[in-house]
Image: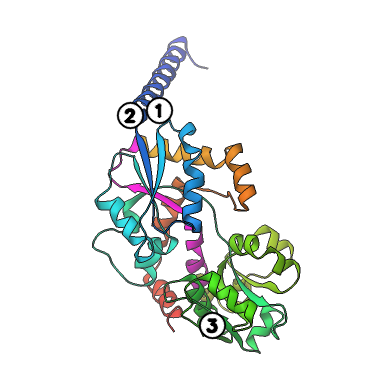
Amino acid sequence: MKTPLAIAATTVACCLFGASAQAQQDDIAAFYSGKTVTILVGSSPGGGYDLYARLISRHMSKHLPGAPSFVVSNMPGAGGNVAAANIANVAAKDGTAIGAIFMGAVVEPLFSGTKRATHHPTKFNYIGSANTDYYVCLVRGDSDVKSFADIFEKELVVGASAGGASTRDFALLLKNVLGAKLKIVAGYPGTREINLAIEKGEVAGGCGQSWSSVAAIYQSAFNEGRIKALVQEDSTGYPELNKKGVPLARAFAKTDEQKQILDLVYSQTAFSRPYVVAMETPPARVAALRKAFMETMADKELVAEAAKMKVDADPVSGEELQKKVNAIYATPPEIVEKARKAMEP
């Protein structure tokens, strides 16, 4: 039983904590009031990353104390690394510059061995990810390969982009780890061109494709059976595809090591559309941005707008991303090396 003195001490502590929290909130509001926050997108206008950044910029102001203005600026190049380097070295480090970088920029040093002098993925504060992508292999409806099990007996010709792109790397992963009979035709500029090649019959399929994107763009092709999802390149799978019985690639792994390799590579999908600020950003502003980001992604107006645009609003918190990026960079070197080799031609 607490004594009156203990109760009084607890009450004082609570009051002080409340006052401190309010003072911090007031400080955040005072800082952001009248300011402009720039979201620097690592791609050109019109793409998925740009689309999400502009969607968020239209709603985040009302969730950040001080209600600053938000603008979007594009800085494409080097798979999002030009924008990442700018956030790390050039842009303001006070919480007014947010980078919308690529998933590939987060995992590049891990899987490619490329080390950039300008920045490292673990040296950012992660604000959140706008959605979690689930990747799939697509196949023409008239292909001889009717199920993923067939791919171990029949060759499937798939289109892919250059090295470092999920369309090539994820296909190589299935081929080199699981023994899938894939003939990979690389060199397509992007998924749009790969999917046009599938429709024309130049190739029979394509892997490493974001389900949310292709499901929205090629809805009629899926409904008519001209294209279908063959397998999910993910550790848990998209609920809708799980219900439809589209299998996980990891279900075809024969050893625990194969599962470890697949899970490591697929773990990067949590960073589908990551937003970061410089490591030097004051912790209180990082916390405020993280809170505002998650509130923004749950904003009814944003959710309604996202539904009209046919894009997912399935966020991952900044705290969770920070843990994930540290965890994948702590993966045993032998597993990382095997994953790297699995994505080599």
* Residue at 40% in and 33% down: 68
Q: Name the residue under label 3.
A: 175
Q: Is residue 49 above or below residue 142?
A: above
Amino acid type indicated by mark 1 = Gly
Amino acid type indicated by mark 2 = Phe
Q: In this view, does 82 lie to the left or right of 103?
A: left
Q: Mark 1 points at which residue?
A: 66
Residue 80, visible in the rendered structure: yes
| Magenta residues, start to end | 261-284
> Do the residues bearing badges 1 and 3 touch, measured as CB atoms within 8 Å?
no
* Relative image position of residue 232 (x, y in whole percent): 62, 69
Amino acid type indicated by mark 3 = Lys
Q: Does the magenta stretch include residue 181?
A: no
Label 3's element? Answer: helix
Residue 330, visible in the rendered structure: no
Q: Is residue 266 magenta?
A: yes
Label 1's element? Answer: loop
* Relative image position of residue 150 (x, y in whole percent): 68, 84
How many numbered markers are drawn?
Answer: 3
Q: In which quarter of the image is residue 136?
A: bottom right
Front residue (pair 217, 324):
217
Give how far apart the Cα atoms at labels 1 and 3 are: 52 Å
Front residue (pair 261, 69):
69
